[in-house]
């Protein structure tokens, strides 16, 4: 049981990272859609995006419960700040593209 408590944050992190990567890969398929094939890519992206948003919100809520039960307020606040950044990226993936483009143009010129 102690080992499970130790690896649980890693498992949750892997799940969140996988969800975000799936969201971005779906966006790539939706963007590369050919003409005349319907809008399957866009519908798949919208559906998967909505599912990832709810899963990410659920994961944040589940992680907050032990912090609240143990009255670990500072860890809860720190986690909520990190979770807010991740949830912002999950809910608006275009912002990550804009941020990456801005950083790239500043570094490269």
Image: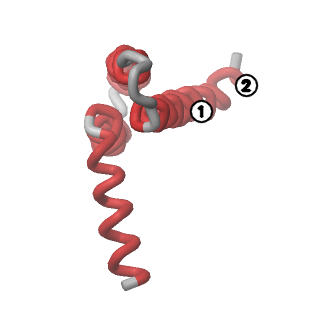
Report the disc number at residue 3: 2
Q: Which quarter of the figure has residue 40?
A: top left
Colouring convention used in this rendered image of the protein: secondary structure
**Quadrant where the C terminus lies?**
bottom left
Q: Nearer the viewer, residue 100 or 45?
A: 45
Q: Residue 75: which quarter of the image?
A: top left
Tag count: 2
Can the viewer see residue 68? yes
Give the x, y percent position of residue 22.
52, 29
Residue sitting at 30 percent across and 68 percent down?
102
Residue at 42%, 34% in the rendered image: 27
Q: Answer left or right for 26 relative to 88.
A: right
Q: CA–CA distance between discs 2 and 1? A: 17 Å
Label 1 packing within 10 angstroms: few (<14), some (14-19), many (20+): few
The residue at the point 41 percent across, 81 percent down is 107
Q: Quadrant of residue 69?
A: top left
**Residue 42: assigned label:** none
Give percent across and percent down for residue 94. 29, 45
Q: Secondary structure at mark 1?
A: helix
Q: Which residue is mark 1?
A: 14
Q: Pointer 2 and pointer 1: residues touching (CB < 8 Å)?
A: no
- Nearest the eye: 84 or 6: 84
Q: Nearer the viewer, residue 52 or 98?
A: 98
């Amino acid at each position: 049981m102690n080992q499970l408590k130790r690896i649980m944050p890693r498992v949750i992190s892997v799940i969140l990272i996988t969800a975000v990567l799936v969201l971005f890969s779906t966006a790539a398929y939706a963007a590369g859609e050919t003409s005349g094939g319907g809008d399957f890519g866009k519908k798949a992206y919208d559906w998967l995006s909505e599912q990832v948003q709810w899963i990410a919100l659920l994961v944040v809520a589940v992680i907050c419960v032990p912090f609240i039960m143990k009255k670990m307020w500072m860890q809860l606040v720190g986690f909520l700040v990190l979770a807010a950044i991740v949830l912002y990226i999950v809910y608006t993936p275009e912002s990550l593209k804009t941020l990456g483009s801005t950083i790239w143009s500043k570094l490269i010129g």
